[in-house]
Amino acid sequence: MGAGKSTAARRTAELLGIHCSDSDELIEEKTGLSAAQHFEAHGEPAFRAAEEAAVLELLAQPPQVISLGGGSLGSVAVVEALEDHVTVLLDVDLDVAWARIQGSDRPLGRDRAGFEYLYHEREAVYRELADANFSSSDSDVIEAALPSLVSMAHGSAGSLRMLWAAGPGGGYPVWVGEDALAHAPWPLPVESRRIVVSDTNVGDLYAGKIPHASGLIEIPAGEESKTLQTAESVWHALVEQHATRADHIVAVGGGVVGDLAGFCAGTYQRGVPVVQVPTTLVAQVDSAFGGKTGVDLPEAKNYVGIYHQPSAVIVDPALLASLPPEQMAAGYAEVVKTALIAGGLLWERVGGGDGIDEQIIRECARTKLAVVAADERDAGPRQKLNLGHTVGHAIEAATGYSVLNHGEAISLGLLAALRLSDNDELRAEVKALLAAAGLPTSFAGLDVEAVLEATTLDKKRLRGDVPFVLCSDPGSVRYGVEVDERELRAAVEELVA
């Protein structure tokens, strides 16, 4: 309720030129009572029985777009019938949904506590059953996503799940699942040449799996390669391959490759498309999404770059099988960070010590996409995604990008941020999770003065002090917080052991 599914369903049907049905409207047509009236007059069990019958009747009809009642997925028969159809979830924030339904004729529109309970009760079921997940029901989003939805309806996407990254121009698809490289519908015309940019770690492993790839540009592996000099070598290689704006780059690799290849794509001939194929856990749960691209300077990380949204992101968790243990651990730091931001179901699993699986990867991606959709250019809420990164990036810069990998630095940065957040219990819990994953919780070689100096170059700083991101509880994150210099020093000094 309150997600905008009726409006979205009508718009989708209009664009496809097919019929649109609404299960609540069918109930009213058959009983003479609206859904709310039926619920109040006959009680919930009778309404759910009528709802199940209406939905099963609609699902048995010729292809159409159906707006399903929110409780219909509580029916085993409906869930089984949906296996032969494409199920789309409009995943709106609780407060947004409540604002839309408050004061309506529905019983829950007058009961905030009951609405919240039902929202959280259904949340996990909806997300697990959805083939496609949207954070917006805007018309331009529906129109942009239509080719991807049609591909799913025709079965060409196999068993992949899709998350839609809403943004300017409608957004882009994120395909998640096993064998994604083989089954993900390609977002660009086949005549657009696919030029793979990868690194010496995975280029030979995966570049050949990109369908119809026309060339490979390899860069040295490692954060040390994320420089303007490496970007220049990629630009020259694109020129040598006669790449034009009709072609596109496919970034195959981890965060370094994704950031650098995206930067080269956004600047070469003033912009060519890029498709991100993340092969590390860091990239699959975080860096491949959101359009931030760039290179490092000796003084600071990611200091030169642009926003350049991908045309698609293709996530195959099976690609992580070849990842060294230290790289899996590095990605786990970003998983913990994202779970702290999301709270709820994701934190329950991550905080409970569950291992990484496709659902956790998908939920991390969904969390980041929802944040970015609200603030693409990092002017406000997107800064939440920098939890642990102010000190983490400073540690990377202070150690020359060669002593600790990104995840190891973020592990330390998270502990510093949680100390500043004044929740010792949560900090101890996170410290145990990070240590169990093999991540550092202290570092004897840390130069405190160099780290403190590097924090002053944080990109979020506009004037005055550096704004920090703090987390008082899972799901409760504040950004733009100024912290006392003495407290910051103490938080960094505590990391030295």
Image (cartoon, rainbow, N blue to C red):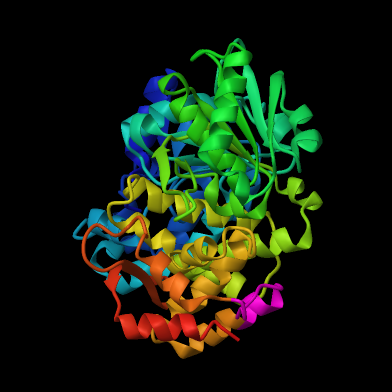
Direction bottom: furthest residue:
424
In this view, 37 is above or below 68: below
Residue at the image position 59 percent from the left and 11 percent from the top: 242
Please name whichever residue, 11 or 466, is drawn nearer the observer in this view of the structure: 466
* Res. 150 image quadrant: top right
Q: In this view, does 359 lie above or below 190?
A: below
**Residue drawn at point x = 50 percent, y = 25 percent:** 273
In what quadrant of the picture does the C terminus appear?
A: bottom right
Q: Nearer the viewer, residue 69 or 208?
A: 208
- When the figure is inspected, residue 114 is found, relative to residue 200, above or below; the finding is below
Number of residue marks: 0
Frontmost residue, 253 versus 476: 253
Could you tell whether 238 is left or right of 214 in the image? Answer: left
Residue beneath the point at 35% across and 61% down? 94
Q: Where is residue 467 in the image (x, y as percent from the top left)?
A: 30, 67
Measuring from the top left, give residue 235's x and y in whole percent.
Answer: 55, 24
Can you see residue 162?
no
Q: Residue 438: say if magenta.
A: yes
Task: Give the image location of residue 322, x and y in percent.
Answer: 81, 50
Asked whether 51 falls inside the magenta stretch, the response is no
Q: Where's residue 103, x and y in %?
A: 18, 60
The magenta stretch spans which residues? 432-445
- State the residue in front, 45 or 317: 317
Residue 386, quarter of picture: bottom left
Residue 30 visible to the viewer: yes
Q: Name the chief secondary structure element in magenta.
A: loop
Q: Which residue is drawn at 39% across and 41% down?
A: 30
